[in-house]
Image (spheres, rainbow, N blue to C red):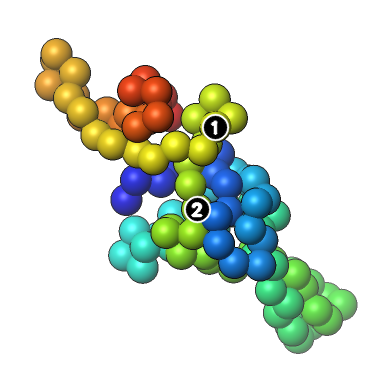
Amino acid sequence: MRIKKGDQVKIIAGNDKGKKGKVLKVFPKNNRVIVEGINFIKRHTRPSQNNPQGGIVEKEAPIHASNVQLLHNGEPTRIGHDYLEDGTKVRIAKKTGEVIDS
């Protein structure tokens, strides 16, 4: 996957189009990511020890990775891969050609 945990992304499709957020969790097997403050769902929970009141809980649901775009220096960009002189593989921003550090 090109998107990693901790990346700043912009939503490019869906109900939250145009919003920005931080990637909280990545699911490479399903090609999905959870973005902070994006794609909220309501979950009806029964009372438990952790939540003695129960009721309706809102939480973020996964969104497909193709619907997010990485933000590098505040600009949306596509991601490529390149190798440095020492042989390490790094992600690069296609727009500027700079190495993405994270």
Q: Mark 2 and mark 1: span between their CA atoms?
A: 13 Å
Residue 90, percent from left and from top: 27, 28
Q: Identify the secondary structure beneath mark 2.
A: strand
Residue drawn at (39%, 23%) of the image: 96
Vertical position of residue 79 compared to residue 55: above or below: above
Q: Quadrant of residue 43?
A: bottom right
The residue shown at (55%, 62%) is 13
Q: Residue 27 location, x and y as percent?
A: 40, 60
- Left or right, residue 69 beside residue 39: left
Instruction: Where is residue 68? Give x, y as percent.
Output: 50, 53
- Which quadrant holds residue 88? top left
The amino acid sitting under disc 2 is Val
Residue shown at the point (40%, 29%) measured from the top left: 95
Which residue is under mark 2? 68
Q: Nearer the viewer, residue 101 or 58?
A: 101
Query: Circle 1 sits on which residue?
Result: 75
Q: Which mark lies nearer to you, 2 or 1? A: 1
